[in-house]
Every structure is written in structure tokens, then in C-alpha cells.
Image: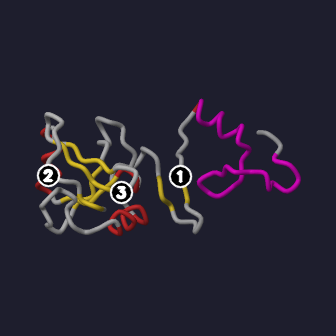
Amino acid sequence: PHDTGPTGTEQRCETDRGLPIDPRDAVAAILTGRIRRVVYDSAGVVIDLGRTQRLFRGSTREAVWLQGRQCLWPGCGVTAHQQDHTDEWASDHGPTSTHNAGPMCSRHNRWKHHGYRTWRDPDGIWHTTRPDGTPLDRPRAA
């Protein structure tokens, strides 16, 4: 292990038990073992857990529900009971994060597996395209 210095204040990495570690030791752990990236917002709330978790849980789940409770599919309006990865977790390696999630009803969530695609632009507007790439209806604000 590397010396963390007298105060340890320069550390930005820690173990799952909260013990500070030198960033160089974290890199070594990445190369030789398993390490998990966890991103917190300024209030200390977890906003991204990386790719080890597929389901939306805890504060990430709450943050997705705050985006809206209706299915994002154009013209649907049904109360969403599922949170869906915009970039699929398994096939597209999409992260389980608020930036890659939206509320959907179970019916339209299944349509994504038949070539339909949903995505959100930088302004927060949802878009849906058919399997041939043509837009489906007009975009809906998040």
C-alpha cells in the first residue's frame, strides 16, 4: 500500500467499509480484482452504481420516478410501473443510472425488444422511433 500522508485529506477513494485508500491502490485493485464505482451527488445521495446492478433501487429509483409517473411512449399516458434502461443493460451495456432511465408501462417496455427505440435529448425531450428509424408521433417533454 502507498502512504496516504499524515492527514489522509488528499484521498478520494475508499473501501466499501469507508477506509481511505490511495488512488494508486484503487487502480491496482481494478487490475487484479473487482472494484465498484459509486457516484454521489453533492448531498451524498447515490446517483450511479455502475454496471453491477441491473435493477433501479433506492435513491436512483426515486430519482427516475421524479421524472414522471406516466409511460414516456407518445400518446400512452398509462401510469408507468416499470423503469426502463434507454440503452439496454444487457445488450447495449447501458448503465443503471438516472441518465439512462425512463418510466414505461409494461406493454411499451416490451415493444423495445421488437426494434422500437426511446431516447432523451439534452433538453430532456423523449423521442421514440420505429424499427425502421422513423419518428413515432411527436416528442414529449420529460
**Residue at 47% across / 54% down in the picture?**
48
Measured in 3D between alpha carbons, the distance from the residue under mark 3 to the one under mark 1, in whole angstroms, is: 24 Å
* Quadrant of the frame with the C terminus: bottom left
Query: In the rendered view of the protein, which quadrant contains the N terminus?
Result: top right
Judge from the rendering whether residue 75 lies leftward or rightward of residue 81; answer left or right: left
Q: Amino acid at mark 2?
A: Asp
Answer whether residue 118 is magenta in the image: no
Q: Is 40 on the left-hand or right-hand side of 13?
A: left
Task: Give the amino acid type for the residue marked by disc 1 in the picture.
Answer: Val
Q: Amino acid at mark 3?
A: Gly
User: Answer yes or no: do the residues labelled 3 and 1 have beta carbons within 8 Å?
Assistant: no
- Mark 1 residue element: loop
Q: Earlier in the sequence, mark 3 or mark 2?
A: 3
Mark 1, residue position: 38
Which of the two marks, 2 or 1, is nearer to us in this view? 2
Residue sitting nearer the eye, 14 or 87:
87
Residue at 59%, 54% in the rendered image: 16
Earlier residue among tags 3 and 1: 1
Range of magenta residues: 4-31
Mark identifier at residue 124: 3
Residue 88 position within the rendered picture, expressed as x and y whole percent measured from the top left:
29, 42
Q: Report the residue that reaches farthest toward the front.
A: 138
Relative to 77, say whether 87 is above or below: above
Foreground label between 3 and 1:
3
Residue assigned mark 2: 137
Which x, y percent locates residue 141? 28, 61
- The Cα atoms of the two marked residues, 3 and 2, are separated by 17 Å
Task: Give the farthest residue toward the right.
Answer: 6
- Where is residue 108? Give x, y as percent: 14, 53
Q: Residue 128, position in %: x, y?
A: 20, 48
